[in-house]
């Protein structure tokens, strides 16, 4: 943990923490990005299948790996309080939870995949691509979850450049595997969207092995001996992790599933509409990596300061993160408005899909500011370990208000599929307002304590 006194020093340190996280998130996201992009060049039917499959996969993965993010504020506060001896046991409990979660997801996908896909009104070939894509992704469940634990541990120590290094190594491997497996190179069969799922899973294994080697052999990670002196599963420590991690995971699940729910509800429209929606969502999600990375950095910084009982410094880092994200949101809006047709053309040559995607990009630009506020505010709240109220607010904002609004506008007005995006804007905006209010209240509470 680096001591900072002035706003300038804090800004520099935040950039030092956040920039590697951003590069890491973008590189990780590029795996999904290139799954969609390279599949779109194969066929729009496979693009629609991957779209549906990823819409089911992403919220489950994000929500459950979000539970493992509880390690970050816990370890960050232990480091801030200089309780290094407690770090190893908490990380090991995280490994146990990760394996358990991976097992339950695998069973859930095997049992529920066909009933769920049969409920969704899809063309037969689109449904089959979605099914096989999900089965291929299951191959990477265990390494993906174990890596999430290691990354949370690494980032909590403030060594975010290490995560960046690992992910940058794996990204080109994923692209190469996509090329071989999607299009059928070097004598292998062309698997289309199914090959994209297999390529991602193989890459997750690579990420895990590289990270284990780094943590075992390099300081400061090796000094904490997380792979030595294995403790038995501890109910008390697991409760601490899940008490923090479960609300984080559920909050992320609530946020990501609303996007996935919109995609699935839009399956009543044509393949072109589904594909255009996925193109817009895919690129918008790439832009979201900026406020998300700032949020993850703010969690680490606030966690360190709260652990050291430096509550004023924690407050400064919280709002510094929000202001930085807001500034970048205007850049995102400009990109979406000015270059939306060119961006759509990167994904596909289909004129109908391009025209629809351009319209979706306009609505995507409208919720950039809300995203820029709510993401770092959530990150700050996690640094304070304030997660339960955050989860409740997320449920109300996204599911009680946002999704029903989108459904009503999409079903009963002339907005059609664009009505769902208006609902997203409403939900994200209300989320930003309520979460911001919660952060202000919490900081006042801590200032009284100090």
Image (cartoon, helix red, strand yellow):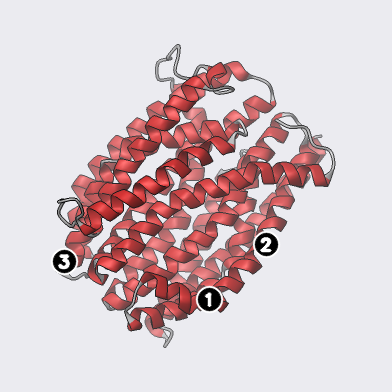
Q: Nearer the viewer, residue 172 or 430?
A: 172
Q: Which residue is mark 3?
A: 125
Q: Position of residue 184 (x, y in %)?
A: 19, 56
From where the camera sits, is residue 207 visible?
A: yes
**Looking at the image, which residue sits at the far right?**
6
Q: Is residue 165 above or below residue 395?
A: above
Residue occupying image coordinates x 80% and y 40% = 312
Residue occupying image coordinates x 67% and y 42% = 16
Quadrant containing the C terminus in the rendered view: top right
Q: Position of residue 441 (x, y in %)?
A: 73, 49
Mark seen at residue 326: 2
Mark 3 falls on what kind of element? Answer: helix
Q: Which residue is mark 1?
A: 339
**Looking at the image, which residue sits at the far top?**
229
Q: Is residue 344 above or below residue 23?
A: below
Q: Is residue 231 above or below residue 34?
A: above
| Residue 48, quarter of picture | bottom left
Q: Position of residue 158 (x, y in %)?
A: 62, 34
Q: Nearer the viewer, residue 54 or 421?
A: 54
| Sequence-first tag of 2 and 3 | 3
Apparent side of residue 104 relative to residue 17 in the rendered image (left or right): left
**Looking at the image, which residue sits at the far bottom?**
414
Decide: few, some or many residues near mark 2? Use Cα within 10 Å; few <14, some 14-19, many ≥20: some
| Sequence-first tag of 1 and 3 | 3
Q: Nearer the viewer, mark 1 or mark 3?
A: 1
Mark seen at residue 313: none
From where the camera sits, is residue 381 visible?
A: no
Q: Are marks 1 and 3 in contact (CB under 8 Å)?
A: no
- As measured in the structure, the alpha-carbon distance from the residue carrying label 1 to the one carrying label 2 is 20 Å
| Residue 193, quarter of picture | bottom left
Q: Nearer the viewer, mark 1 or mark 2?
A: 1
Residue occupying image coordinates x 56% and y 17% = 223
């Amino acid at each position: 943990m680096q001591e900072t006194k002035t706003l300038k020093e804090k800004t520099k340190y935040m950039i030092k923490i956040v920039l590697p996280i951003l590069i890491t998130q973008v590189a990780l996201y590029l795996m999904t990005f290139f799954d969609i992009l390279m599949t779109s060049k194969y066929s729009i039917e496979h693009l629609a299948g991957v779209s549906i499959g990823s819409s089911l996969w992403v919220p489950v993965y994000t929500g459950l790996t979000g539970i493992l993010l509880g390690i970050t504020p816990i370890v960050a506060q232990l480091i801030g309080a200089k309780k290094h001896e407690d770090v190893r046991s908490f990380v090991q409990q995280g490994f146990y939870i990760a394996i358990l979660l991976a097992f339950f997801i695998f069973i859930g996908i095997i049992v529920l995949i066909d009933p769920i896909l049969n409920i969704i009104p899809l063309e037969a070939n689109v449904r089959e691509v979605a099914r096989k894509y999900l089965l291929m992704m299951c191959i990477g469940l265990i390494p993906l979850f174990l890596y999430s634990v290691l990354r949370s541990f690494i980032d909590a120590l403030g060594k975010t450049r290490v995560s960046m290094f690992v992910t940058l190594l794996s990204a080109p491997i994923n692209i190469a595997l996509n090329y071989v497996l999607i299009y059928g190179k070097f004598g292998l069969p062309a698997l289309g969207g199914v090959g994209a799922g297999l390529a991602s899973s193989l890459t997750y294994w690579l990420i895990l092995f590289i990270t284990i080697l780094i943590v075992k052999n390099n300081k400061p990670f090796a000094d904490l001996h997380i792979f030595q002196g294995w403790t038995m599963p501890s109910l008390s420590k697991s409760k601490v992790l899940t008490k923090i991690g479960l609300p984080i995971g559920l909050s992320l699940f609530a946020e990501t599933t609303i996007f996935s729910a919109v995609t699935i509800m839009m399956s009543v429209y044509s393949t072109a509409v589904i594909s255009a929606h996925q193109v817009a969502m895919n690129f918008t999600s790439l832009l979201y990596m900026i406020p998300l990375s700032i949020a993850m950095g703010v969690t680490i910084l606030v966690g360190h300061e709260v652990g050291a009982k430096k509550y004023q410094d924690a407050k400064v880092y919280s709002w510094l993160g929000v202001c930085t994200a807001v500034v970048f949101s205007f850049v995102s809006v400009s990109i979406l408005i000015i270059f939306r047709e060119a961006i759509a053309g990167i994904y596909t040559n289909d004129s109908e899909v391009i025209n629809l995607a351009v319209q979706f990009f306009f609505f995507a630009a409208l919720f950039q500011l809300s995203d820029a506020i709510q993401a770092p505010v959530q990150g700050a709240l996690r640094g304070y370990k304030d997660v339960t109220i955050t989860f409740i607010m997320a449920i109300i904002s996204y599911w009680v208000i946002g999704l029903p609004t989108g459904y009503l506008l999409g079903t009963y007005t002339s907005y059609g599929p664009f009505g769902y995006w208006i609902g997203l804007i409403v939900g994200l905006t209300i989320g930003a307002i309520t979460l911001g209010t919660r952060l202000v209240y919490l900081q006042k509470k801590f200032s009284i304590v100090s």
